[in-house]
Amino acid sequence: MAERNERVLGDGVAIGCAVLYRVDRLSSCDDNSPSGSGDPNTLVTACLEGRSGTALASLSRTCFCSVHLDAQSEEKRVDQLRRCLTAARRLDTREIVLAGDLNTECLPGSCVAAFVEGAEKPTADDMARECASALRLASSEGDEGEDDATNVQSSVSQEPSKSQLEEWEALWQRACNSTKEHRISLAHVPTGPTRASYDHGKSHGPCVSWRLDHILYTSRSLKLEARWTALEADPDSASSGLPNHANPSDHLPVAALFRPFPIQRLDNAERQSFLERLAAIDARQSAENSDLEEEMAKLEPISAEAVETSSGYAAESAETGKTKNKKKGSRPPPEMIAWIQEKRRRAKD
């Protein structure tokens, strides 16, 4: 990463992810909890909750993720976000705040955007555009000099192939299903553009802007109250590009203000009691179904073979010894119909 910064920013310093918090208002839920992907350049997590008697006392156990998603692969970006959801569940919570450089604009058709609950459903054109963008199906002019998402957000000149689109749609669906699998519903803070530079493949202006930094959160426990503006409120930086004399980074920061809502949770004893009651209900239902099957088997009026014979199914001719064709639309005897209906009624009860 330091080599990239030397090439792009002219400064050979490394980057990293971190979660910083006020210890007088927040406390760590588990000092031995996993801290992320094992690479502090891409993902760091912390499980925090509000301290009693403070303004954040109502903040339930929440997983905070500081991320820097892969710059070149949408599949890797999806996998990194899935790791964030997995980390939250391992920390025994469904509440999450995820923020950082996602290296995508999260436009409709983006697989990263598929993680957002209630996001606009992409059209076929959206999917094709974002697939081409992520696969860098653009003019090859001047590919040197950038290695983040700004490379792929303009000058698209090729259409993705059928197989590429099929793989993209499968990845999009995988991302969409991830929040359902982990039972975590994510909302998106409407952040503005955060990066400005020469357009892809250009060595001169004008500068263009991209929205690459985002904040995702669980809206059932957090209400968005306010957010910082970005390049939409800084026309000078949007025009001159980043970094500049006012901002030493090639990205502007994003921030949001949330109001926490307490989430009711079962303690360990209550949870164990609930699971035991659930297991008892399941066992009782299985036993009742087994008893019903035995009872209804005794009441069955005729055997299945007799039903087939009386209904014209596989009836054998005494003269030819050949099997007749099945009669379409034939019905079982009335007593069999009544038995089936009674079995279904009692199963529902």
Image: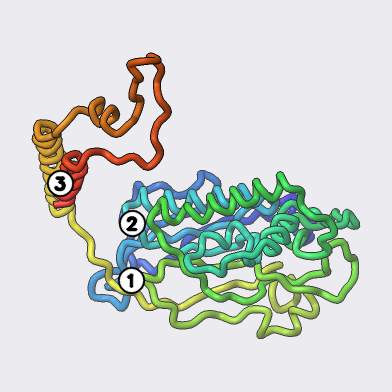
Residue at the image point whose x is 49% and y is 68% from the top: 118
Across and down, in percent, residue 126 comes to 68, 64
Across and down, in percent, residue 245 comes to 75, 77
Q: Amino acid at mark 3?
A: Glu
* Secondary structure type for disc 2: loop
Q: Report the residue marked by disc 2.
A: 93
Residue at the image point whose x is 17% and y is 30% from the top: 302
Q: Report the residue marked by disc 1.
A: 25
Q: Amino acid at mark 2?
A: Thr
Q: Report the residue marked by disc 3.
A: 342
Considering depth in this image, is 306 or 30 the residue closer to the camera? 306
Considering depth in this image, is 103 or 38 the residue closer to the camera? 103
* Secondary structure type for disc 1: loop
Across and down, in percent, residue 9 comes to 77, 61
Residue at the image point whose x is 40% and y is 59% from the top: 184
Across and down, in percent, residue 169 comes to 62, 52
User: Is the Cβ of the residue at disc 2 closer than 8 Å to that at disc 1?
Assistant: no
User: Is the Cβ of the residue at disc 2 closer than 8 Å to that at disc 3?
Assistant: no
**Gap in angstroms between the C-alphas marked 1 and 3:** 62 Å
